[in-house]
Image (cartoon, coloured by chain):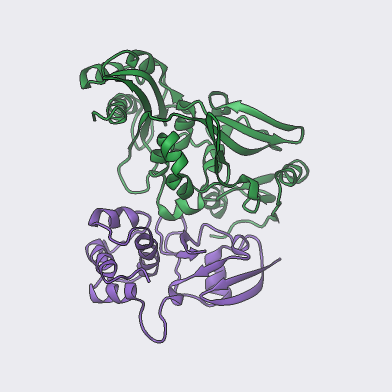
Chain colours: A purple, B green
Amino acid sequence: MTRITVKVDGSSFTDEVEPRTLLVHYLREQLGKTGTVVGCDTSNCGSCTVHLDGRSVKSCSLFAVQADGHEVTTIEGLAANGQLHPMQQAFHENHALQCGYCTPGMIMQSLDLIADNPDPSEDDVRLGLEGNLCRCTGYQNIVKAVRAAAAAGGAQ
Amino acid sequence: MIPAAFEYFTPSTVDEAVALLRDQPDAKVLAGGQSLMPVLRLRLAAPETIVDIGRIGELQGVRDDGDALVIGAMTPHSTVQADPLVGEHARLVSLATATIADPQVRHRGTFGGSLAHADPAGDLPAVAVALDASFVIAGPDGRRTVAAADFFEGVFSTALAEDELLVEVRVPKYTGWGAHYEKFNRVAQQWSIVAVAAAVRLDGDSIAEARVGLTNMGSTPIRASAVEAALVGRPATPEAVREAAALAADGTSPVSDLNGDADYRRHLASVLTRRAVLSAAGTG
């Protein structure tokens, strides 16, 4: 076992983990942050996307020990004071989810995208979300939501 | 799926990492992990020891070294892609890097990891071969430098010995050259079925120098030397480039698989070479 200290959604955690523990399993099973989901187990689907030191990563493709000393933000860390984050609000308003399974990863990647490009075109959004799959194929409204959030200054 | 258990080490220097690779049984280097982690999860590999080189500061970053750029092995793709030095002096590297996988993977995946992995369908090996990059390798007896042409030995196989570590890659400067990476695949995130890396230097309207590398046209990246020779001194017109590009598959033995048989890949090689060279020359 290895001792790690990770800041997750603003709180610091110190835990013993096996080196082979994936970051996503640490988040879900040790910290109870089940908002981050495992979709594919092959690194393709992007459902498990979180931010590591502010940049999007697939938390199934990272060991928890690699996050030692770093800061992780999950979908559960976005809403503040009972208010949805503007990106979450935009997904809600634009019906950007059907079954909702891909949504946590879509939202985390969308935030990364508009941090780099605050005014993305439709093509920019589609390319920026290349690593996130929606098997309901609800992409149209997802793209709409991301552009709406960007237009409303949703990078904050 | 959960990887099999392993001993985990986080060296903080290259020397420490090399000593671990020499002394620990069945050790595997973990760089960005974007190729290794899926393989570990599926238990297609189950090394006894993982040496995580992610905390070795000297492996990070891009620096200017006179007539070459030096790219640290652990520099993430997203950093390489956005680096102004790379954009100015090795634009082909920026362009090919931008096509790798997806943004999340590019935040973690590394320049050196991708090269050392030596996947025939990986995008950077053909670029390194086309640009005559050289690989600085640390081992128990010190450092040595290997030319890109000698680094790739086969499918997932390189000149790196088991107790050696890729430290950095020197890319000669191609300031002012046009560049393009033409990648053919059919769905998002997919590996290149075939891709072509091209860089050209124009003198007026004609091609003074050309570099062309092929991805996934054999077990290693291939330099399309016949195309390069046929381009030099010719005008950068669609007709002249088409003629030269027809030689792209000469001497190659691409695989046949579910994505395409060998004949299809040979056809793709010449079509993509034409597109890549014309785009690189700014007339595509």
Question: In the rendered image of this protein, does residue B126 appear above or below residue A70?
Answer: above
Left or right, A3 with reference to A143? right
Q: Is residue B121 visible?
A: no
Observer able to see residue B155:
yes
Tell me the quarter of the image containing the C terminus of chain B. top left
User: Which residue in the rendered view is the most extreme toward the bottom?
Assistant: A82
User: For residue A8, which quarter of the picture?
Assistant: bottom right
Residue B167 x/y as whole percent: 63, 39
Which percent across, then down, holds residue B61?
56, 46
User: In the drawing, does residue A101 fall left or right of residue A41?
Assistant: left
Count the marks: 0
Residue placed most toward the observer, B3 or A63: A63
Residue at position x 32%, y 75% in the image = A86
Q: In which image quadrant can residue A100 be found?
A: bottom left
In the displayed structure, B128 sits above or below B74; it is above
Q: Residue B191, how many percent across, how many down?
A: 40, 41
B66 lies left or right of B131: right
- For image coordinates 42% across by 17% down, the residue present is B225
Q: Is residue A43 above or below residue B88?
A: below
Percent x, y of residue B48: 70, 50
